[in-house]
Amino acid sequence: MFRIFTRRSSTYANVYRLSIEHPEQFWNEQAQKIFWFKRWNKVYNKNNLLRPHWFQDGHLNMSYNCLDRHISKQQ
């Protein structure tokens, strides 16, 4: 059991490090795992530090991603 925990925590540490060191690459990969009605033009726009924009010009519907896409797979 200790070996499994160590492997999982090591994987977690690697994923966490990637998210901190390369956030745009990390979130780009994560965002590709869900359905987008319109893909984003830029992952992260930090021109306005008070209100940065993630996935600029992208359009998604979280209700669709949480429910509808799973229902359509079953039919």
Image (cartoon, rainbow, N blue to C red):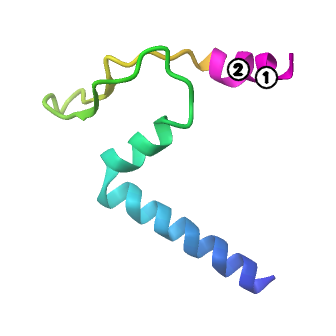
Residue type for callout 2:
Arg
- The image quadrant of residue 55 is top left
* Neighbourhood count class around disc 1 (C-alpha, 10 Å): few under 14, some 14–19, many 20 upward: few
In the rendered structure, find residue 16 and report the number of the disc placed on it: none
Residue 30 in the image: state x and y as whole percent: 49, 42
Closer-to-camera residue (70/8): 70
User: Where is the C terminus found, in terms of image quarters?
Assistant: top right
In the rendered structure, find residue 73 and report the number of the disc placed on it: 1
In the rendered structure, find residue 69 and report the number of the disc placed on it: 2
- For the record, the magenta segment spans 64-75
Identity of the residue drawn at 50% across and 21% down? 36
Instruction: Tell me if residue 66 comes above or below residue 20 in the rendering.
Output: above
Residue type for callout 1:
Lys
Left-right relation of 41 to 14: left
Residue 63, magenta (yes or no): no
Q: Classify mark 2: helix, strand or loop.
A: helix
Disc 1/disc 2 C-alpha distance (Å) = 6 Å
Instruction: Tell me if residue 69 comes above or below residue 14 in the rendering.
Output: above
User: Where is the N terminus found, in terms of image quarters?
Assistant: bottom right
Residue 18 in the image: state x and y as whole percent: 39, 61
Q: Classify mark 1: helix, strand or loop.
A: helix
* Neighbourhood count class around disc 2 (C-alpha, 10 Å): few under 14, some 14–19, many 20 upward: few
Classified by dominant secondary structure, the portion drawn in magenta counts as helix
Residue 65, magenta (yes or no): yes
Identity of the residue drawn at 42% across and 15% down? 38
User: CB atoms at circles 1 and 2 under 8 Å apart?
Assistant: yes
The outermost residue toward the bottom is 2
Closer-to-camera residue (33/10): 33
